[in-house]
Amino acid sequence: MTGSFARRLAKLRLVECVPNFSEGRRKEVVDAITGEIESVPGVTLLDVESNPDHNRCVISFVGEPFSVKEAALAAGRMAVKLIDLNHHKGEHPRMGAVDVVPFVPLSGVTMEDCVGLAREFGKEFAEQLHVPVFLYEEAATTPDRHNLADVRDGEFEKLRDEIGKNPTRKPDFGPEKIHPTAGATAVGAREILIAYNANLGTSNLSVAKKIAHELRSKDGGLAFVKALGFELKERGIVQVSMNLTNFRKSQMFKAYEMVRLFAERYGVPVVGSEVVGLVPMDAIIDSAEFYLRLENFSRDQILEEKLFAPRLDTLTDRSLSLFSEEVASRKATPGGGSVSAYMGALGAGLVCMVARITLGKREPTGNSVRLTEIVSEGEKLRQKLLSLVVEDAAAFDSVIQAYKLPKDNADTRTRAIQAATIKATEVPMSTIELAHQSLKLAGELADIGTTSALSDVATAVAASMGAVEGAASNVLINLNPIKDKSYVDKISKRLTALRSEASKLADSTKKKLEHASM
């Protein structure tokens, strides 16, 4: 695959996840959690912030929705293994080892998508680790859980006493009892949040708490600011810790100026401020305009904006159009094998879509557990098939390179050609195997999927069968030059069986769909 094609395919649906873990003092624990995130393909680690006074770390990473969910699960498993809240002390409120897991829409995804992602993650996390999960913000199932502070009221110790006894403390997922060491976890979906702190030149904690009270929205302050007063014991000062939940309406400079104004009333200076984690450029621009009194300033005047600005993103600029351009070029790759794998990925994607639409219906289906499993299985198939788009092109390129080896060393050249051709056979065989699994899932959805989406099941069947037959043609042409007859016989038998089974599955599903449309 060419470099330009790789860059173009990088225009993906992006979600940010910013989990907060109740550990900010043991670097080895933070590193272990971070390592789990970095081990998941398709995820980019953006930032790691640890605070020993708060005894808390905040980790930011981005990727496609499925990859982000898998990375959050991996990090959660490690945190539950290594963090014991019975021995945890810190300034910041907390109720779990994995205290809060928010999903933030960045590009190509909606808030509704992130709500669905939060609920999928919460269910899997609770089932795998036996930790009660409470949904908050946009993912909340009841209005009284929209605010994270209300969900976390009383922290680990109070929740431990009330869960299972107080009906208002019933978790959305998982057991109605606290995890003995990992507590409980809040999972949600929200817009971009800025964690912004102002440090005061005093050790008097009551001053920070009074200013936080004046500043926060629930007590009549700025509409989109949450604030608490904390003690920074190592530095001998106190801090007003803020979350700006809408930085466009409650800007950073407003928060800072209000802290400074109230601090002056108590005869206390603001000695500094800090951003925890990442901050959007627009938030910094707002503050620059305010303090520098810039007139007629625009984002277009920022050098980096001009240097790294992408060209206009029209339909013809997106990866689907660019992929078809690569296929249409005179280069041998990507070719039929990559196209077959891509068709298979689209078929698996439609399977996921129909299952999600069915799950989202207000009327209970009685099949929610299986539908959730189909979403998970379909996503795994989609990701694997997408990787085969690249692998197939690389495998065929290896065959071409093997044939270019010098003919004066015939044995080495022959071995290389045979090995490369076998690899070029196995990749489309994998495409067939995975597309066959998609056909099985599509057959199930013909029975339990919502009627309004059954036409999409038919398209999933067509795409999956296209993947099977397209990849089969690649397998057959690659078998011809292979000299290992036992290998050729084994693959030929398996190929015949898969094509026959796939055809039967497709025919059976089509009949179900025809019957459902009558």
Image (spheres, rainbow, N blue to C red):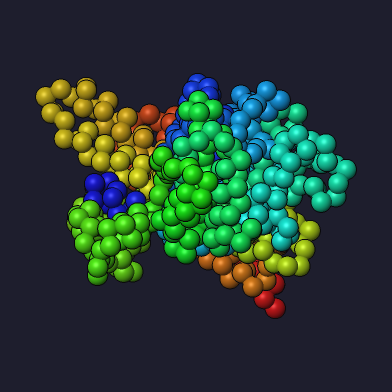
Residue 101: percent from the left, percent from the top? 58, 44
Q: Residue at x 44, y 42 (%)?
A: 269
Q: How many marks?
A: 0
What residue is rendered at 50% in x and 21% in y? 28
Compared across the picture, whether 502 is left or right of 338 comes to right
Image position of 84 (left or right of 55): right
Q: Is 317 or 350 nearer to us in this picture?
A: 317
**Image quarter of residue 41:** top left
Residue 325, by quadrant, is: bottom left
Closer to the camera, 409 or 381? 381
Q: Quadrant of the C terminus?
A: bottom right
Residue 205 location, x and y as percent?
59, 37
Residue 454 in percent (x, y) is at 62, 69
Residue found at x 29% / y 48%: 6
**Residue 387 visible in the displayed image:** yes
* Horizontal side of residue 134 vs 264, given as left or right: right
In this picture, is 31 found above or below 370? Answer: above
Residue at the limit of the structure toward the right, as seen here: 165
Seen in the picture, residue 460 relative to 54 is either above or below; the reply is: below
Does the rendering let one see residue 381? Answer: no
Residue 216 in the image: above or below residue 272: below
From the viewer's side, name the closer residue of 171 and 361.
171
Q: Residue at x 24, y 47 (%)?
A: 2
- Residue 340 in the figure: left or right of residue 293: right
Image location (x, y in percent) of residue 391: 36, 41
